[in-house]
Image (tube, grey):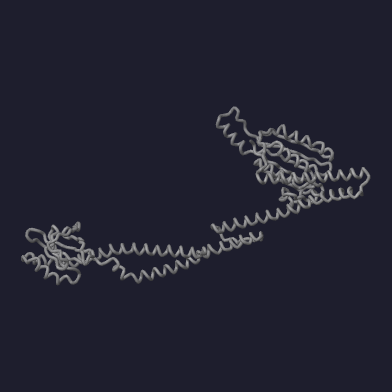
Amino acid sequence: MSLRSRLILTHVSVILLTLVIIGVSLVYILRDYQRQIQLARLGDAVVPLSFQARAMLLNDVAPREILNRLETEAGGVGHVMLITEKGLVLADAANGLTNRTVRLNRQIPEKDFFWGQHILKVNNTERVLLYVGIAAGKASGQTVYVALSAVERPILSALEDILPSLLVAGGITLFLSLIAALLLARSIAKPLTRLAQATEAVARGQYDHRVSGTGGDEIGRLAASFNAMAERVQRSRQMEKDFVANVSHELKTPLTSIQGFSQAILDGAVQDFSHVRRAAQTIFEETARMARLVGDLLVLARFESGEMPLAMETLDLNQLLPHWIECLQPRAKSQGETLITVMDPLLPIAGDAGRLEQVVINLVENAIKYNRPGGTVTVTAKAPAVESATKSSVLARRRAAQVLGTRWVTIAVTDTGAGIPKEDLPRVFERFYRGDKARVAGGTGLGLSIAHEIVAAHGGKIIVESEIGRGSTFTVQLPVK
C-alpha cells in the first residue's frame, strides 16, 4: 500500500473514530437532558392534580377513588400515584407498586416536592420509572403526596429527532476531511516521490540531479539535505575523476622517461659510458619522483581514513621554529632571496613536531620557489598576549586558563612574488591543483593538501591571502595548549 493511501486511510479512520466518540458522548449528554425534561413535564402536570387531591383528602375520599378520579385528569403525561411521606405507595394506577416502598428525593428548598426513580422489570427487561410528587394533604396522620410517573424513554429514542441532522453533519464532515486528507497526502507524498526519483537518478550516476525546494518544513529540510548530499557526491566524484586523471598524468611523464632511457640502453643505442650514466641518473631521478608521489598519496589516504598517528607532545615553538627556518637559509641564498623570521614569545602547543615541521618547510619552500628573484620571504610567528596570573587570585588564574583555551598561535609565511589569481585561491589546497606557474616550477601538487590535513588534525586551520603583483601569505593557526 502506498504512503498516500495509508495517510488517507489513517486520516479517515481518525475522523470516523472522532465522530463515534462524539456520538456516544452526545447520547449520554442527551440522556441526562432528556431525563431533566421528562421530570420537568411531570412536575408541571402534577401541580394542578395536587389541588384536587387535597380537596378529596379533606372529604376522606379513599386513595383508590382519588386515584381513579385523577387518572383521567393526568392528560397522558404520566400515571397517578399516591405515596406517603415514608415512601409507601398507597395506590398506583399502572405500575403495580401499590403497598410497596419507593425512595423519595426531596427537592430543596421546596420541601413539598420530591422526585425519584424506580427500576421496573417488564418481560425480563429493566426499565427506569421516573416520578415527581407534591404534598396534597394528610391521611391517618401522615402526609400524602400525589405523584405522576412515567417510564424513562430509551437512550436511542433521544436521537430520533436529531439523527437525520447528525447524519448530514457527519457526512459533510467526513467528505471535507476526505478532501483534506487527499490534499495532505498529496503535499507529503508528492515531494517524497520526487526525492525517491532523485535518489534513483543519483544511484544511476546522474549526480547533477537536484530536487526543487519545498518550503521550510521537515520535507523542505530533507530536500535541502538531499541537494547538499548530491552536491557533495558530485564534487567527490569529480575530485575522484580529477584524481585519477592527475595521477595518470603525473605518472605518465616519469614512466615515459624511464621506459625511453631503459629501452635505449637495451637496444644498444647508448654505448658511451657518460651517456649510460646520464640515462641511469635520469631513471633514478624519475623513480625518486614517483616514490615521492606515491608516498604523498599514501600520507593523504591515511589522514583521510584517520589512520595517521600523531605524536602529540608539548612543543615549544620558540626553540623549534627558528631551527626549522634556519635549515632553509641555504636554499633561499641559492635563489638570491632573503629569508626573515619575526617572532613574538610563543605559548606552548600540543602537536607532532615532525608533521608541523613538514607544514612549515612546505610553506617556506613554496614561498622561495614562487618568489621573484631577489625577493623576500618573511616568517612571522605571533601569539596573543595573556595577563599573568602568577600573583593573582585563583579566580584570575582560572580566567587566564579559559583565555588560553581559546587563543591561537599564528605562523604566517609571506613572499613578494607574483601572487595567486583570485579564481585560484579556493582551490590551492586541492590535490594536484597547480596554477600555470606552479606547473612550470614542478612538484607533485600534493604539498599544500598534506599541509592542510596536518593542520586540521591538530585542530587548527590554514588560510591563504594573495594579491597579484605583491605576493601571497599562508597563515597557519594552531590552538594553544
Q: Is residue 481 left or right of residue 78?
A: right
Mark count: 0
In percent of width and height, residue 428 lies at 73, 49
Q: Is residue 317 left or right of residue 87?
A: right
Q: Residue at x 82, y 40 (%)?
A: 337
Q: Quadrant of residue 165?
A: bottom left
Q: Residue at x 57, y 57 (%)?
A: 222
The residue sitting at the top extreme is 391
Residue toward you, 290 or 321? 290
In percent of width and height, residue 153 lies at 25, 67
In percent of width and height, residue 348 lies at 66, 34
> Relative to residue 100, is residue 249 depicted above or below?
above
In percent of width and height, residue 275 lies at 91, 45
The residue sitting at the right extreme is 272
Q: Residue at x 11, y 70 (%)?
A: 68
Residue toward you, 475 or 220? 220
Q: Quadrant of residue 279?
A: top right
Residue toward you, 420 or 228? 228
User: Which quadrant would the C terminus be assigned to in this image?
Assistant: top right
